Image (cartoon, rainbow, N blue to C red):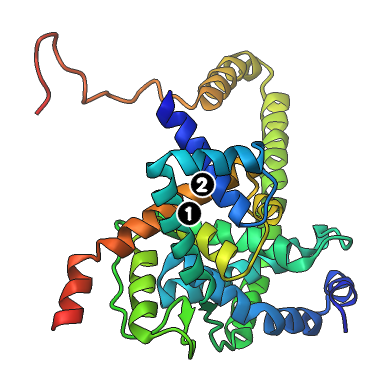
């Protein structure tokens, strides 16, 4: 419990050093730091690390990315019509299939009763994403360990 | 030209306006990507991908917001995606500066030691520490930028700095070798 208390004091002390508002009162933190040597040492070391960090500057690398970005944008623009064709095909193929089915059924009405169950089974397994004919090679006998 | 005007033009389909945004923010973005990835080539790749994502999403951008914080979210997603694809962390040799610039007041060996210690932090910790100390973001801004609560920023920052201090106190074997050899 004491550790949790110490840690919350340390976290709050560092946030306070960053100029942030903390859930503890500043006097409460200072009093704890006066009586707890472990916390005092830790906070002093962290403040020194802060100072070292704050004396640094971020490197801002020279960059000229437009040519590369533009090249990729143009490549993706070229791919875009293909994507639209795919979208069109997504609608066109089922419609075409439906039309073919209608033609078949009109030519021979008895076929309808044979086709419907097949379509239903395909639809169900397609929806469940399970292949009922797949052979599971990973099945092992009880007590047998797989290598 | 200010950002909202430029973004409006981008939203209307102007590529020149987008070029302006790329040229304006590319260096800053490279600096941030390097801080997360600690790799020059990966950073270059992540920034390019992020700009392409931004171009594709700019139509949905809310003009009342600032561009860079929005772009930063895209960039860090790209960076962390790249990191997830990495098999293991690659330790770069520190022949060149990756995150910290040379400052006259700071001895080069201190900068190298700090850069080495930063390298040994996790990407999240490195991101947090550098955003706080090199960009001077407040906890509020950090919380917004990283999409985490302010209390989480406070504790993560404490732990990241603690780890950094430990790394500074105990230089890695490679660091020791480079100093003695």
Which residue lies at the image location 48% right of the left edge and 54% below the top edge? B124
Q: Can residue B124 be seen in this view?
A: yes
Q: Is mark 1 on a helix, strand or loop?
A: helix
Above or below — where is B179 with respect to B134?
below
**What is the chain identity of the residue bearing mark 2?**
B
Which residue lies at the image location 81% right of the left edge and 81% below the top edge? B17
Above or below — where is B175 with respect to A68?
above
Any mark on residue B156, and which?
Answer: 2
Q: In the visual, does A92 lie left or right of B98?
A: right
Indicate the quadrant containing the C terminus of chain A: top left, top right, bottom left or bottom right. Answer: top left
Q: Nearer the viewer, mark 1 or mark 2?
A: 2
Any mark on residue A50, and which?
Answer: none
Whether the residues at callouts 1 and 2 have beta carbons within 8 Å, the answer is yes
Q: Is residue B81 visible?
A: no
For mark 1, what is the residue?
B124
User: Could you tell me residue B79's position as x and y percent?
Assistant: 51, 61
**Could you tell which of marks 1 and 2 lies nearer the N-terminus?**
1
Above or below — where is B38 with respect to B138?
below
């Amino acid at each position: 419990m004491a550790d949790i208390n110490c840690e919350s004091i340390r976290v709050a002390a560092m946030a306070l050093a960053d100029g942030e508002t903390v859930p503890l009162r500043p006097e409460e933190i200072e009093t704890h730091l006066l009586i707890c040597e472990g916390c005092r040492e830790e906070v002093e070391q962290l403040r020194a690390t802060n100072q070292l960090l704050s004396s640094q500057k971020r490197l801002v690398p020279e960059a000229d990315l437009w040519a590369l970005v533009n090249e990729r944008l143009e490549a993706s623009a070229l791919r875009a019509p293909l994507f639209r064709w795919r979208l069109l095909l997504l609608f066109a193929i089922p419609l075409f299939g439906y039309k073919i089915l209608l033609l078949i059924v009109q030519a021979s009405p008895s076929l309808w009763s044979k086709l419907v169950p097949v379509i239903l089974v395909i639809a169900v397994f397609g929806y469940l994403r399970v292949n009922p004919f797949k052979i599971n090679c990973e099945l092992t006998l009880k007590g047998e360990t797989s290598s | 030209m200010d950002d909202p005007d430029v973004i409006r033009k981008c939203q209307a389909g102007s590529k020149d306006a987008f070029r302006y945004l790329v040229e304006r923010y590319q260096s800053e973005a490279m600096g941030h990507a390097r801080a997360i990835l600690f790799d020059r080539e990966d950073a270059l790749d992540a920034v390019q991908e992020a700009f392409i994502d931004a171009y594709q999403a700019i139509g949905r951008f809310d003009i009342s917001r600032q561009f860079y914080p929005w772009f930063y979210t895209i960039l860090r997603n790209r960076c962390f995606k790249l990191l997830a694809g990495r098999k293991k962390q690659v330790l770069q040799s520190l022949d060149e500066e990756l995150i910290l610039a040379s400052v006259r007041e700071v001895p080069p060996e201190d900068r190298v030691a700090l850069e080495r210690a930063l390298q040994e932090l996790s990407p999240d910790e490195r991101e947090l520490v550098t955003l706080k100390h090199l960009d001077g973001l407040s906890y509020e801004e950090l919380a917004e930028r990283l999409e985490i609560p302010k209390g989480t920023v406070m504790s993560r920052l404490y732990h990241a700095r603690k780890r950094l201090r430990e790394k500074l106190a105990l230089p890695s074997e490679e660091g020791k070798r480079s100093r003695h050899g």
